[in-house]
Image: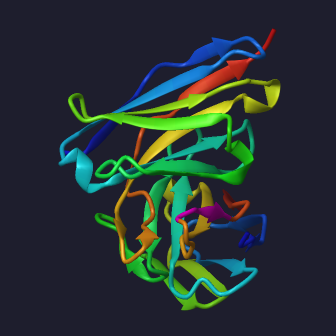
Amino acid sequence: QVHLLQSGGELKKPGASLNVSCRASGYTFNTYGIAWLRQAPGQGLEWMGWINTYTGSTNYAQKFQGRVAMTKDMSTNTAYMELKGLTSDDTAVYYCARARFYDFLLRPGDFWGQGTLVVVSS
Amino acid sequence: EIVMTQSPATLSVSPGERATLSCRASQSVSGNLAWFQQKPGQAPRLLIYDASTRATDIPARFSGSGSGTDFSLTISSLESEDFAVYYCQQYNNWPPAWTFGQGTKVEIK
């Protein structure tokens, strides 16, 4: 069965960088993109960007341009999201989601990771 | 950026009753609209995509309708496990990007 397993929660200091992994299983990794989203405490869902796991191309939300990087490792079926220059506003649960890309559309995520809680505090 | 607006913010419903949630886009998204359910401490769960297609294993009491800018999600007869927050999401972008509504909380009346 399809499963996305994310890395564990982290406590970070302001200015630090965050690395979250998302290990996929149960399907052919490069046939679906991986999208990254986050959800601040008590808030809604915020799109961060996605990586085309077949080509490696990425598209980031403008808000995170220059601060985020999404990569993949085909040998381990794992996607990674790095976010630099953390502030307290980056405190959130971070999610990866599997999404099929076709007809020039990134379809909605049909399987999601369990979420990674990141707290940014001095 | 396409802005998604959901209403109401909170919907109080008794078990067995019908619930209708609304979602409006600031510009047409065609039929590229999804609905998600999220329970506390859990990841979102895809319910509906392409405005009206139920995702795998989603019960028939969930139905979606609409196109263009106005959409709705109907839960025909609420069960206890349906009390949650529901988000709409559009995916009618190039380059690809998703935007979500702010959510509707369905609570027990």
Look at the image and give the residue range highlighted in magenta: B96-100
Tell me: A33 left or right of B10: left
Tell me: A111 left or right of B16: left
Is residue A99 located in the magenta-colored stretch of the structure?
Answer: no
Image quarter where the N terminus of chain A lies is top left
Query: Percent x, y for residue A74?
Result: 24, 35
Query: Percent x, y for residue A23?
Result: 32, 32
Q: Nearer the viewer, residue B86 or A7?
A: A7
Query: Percent x, y for residue A71?
Result: 42, 36
Tell me: A105 left or right of A3: right
Tell me: A23 left or right of B11: left
Query: Percent x, y for residue A47?
Result: 61, 52
Q: Quadrant of residue A103?
A: bottom left
Establish if A116 lies above or below A29.
above
Q: Residue at x 57, y 90 (%)?
A: B66
Q: Residue at x 78, y 71 (%)?
A: B8
Establish if A81 lies above or below A85.
below
Q: Residue at x 44, y 65 (%)?
A: A106
Q: Quadrant of residue B22?
A: bottom right
Q: Nearer the viewer, residue A21 or B41?
A: A21
Q: Is residue B78 visible?
A: no
Q: Nearer the viewer, residue B34 or A52?
A: A52
Q: Is residue B61 visible?
A: yes
Give the prevailing secondary structure in the magenta stretch: loop
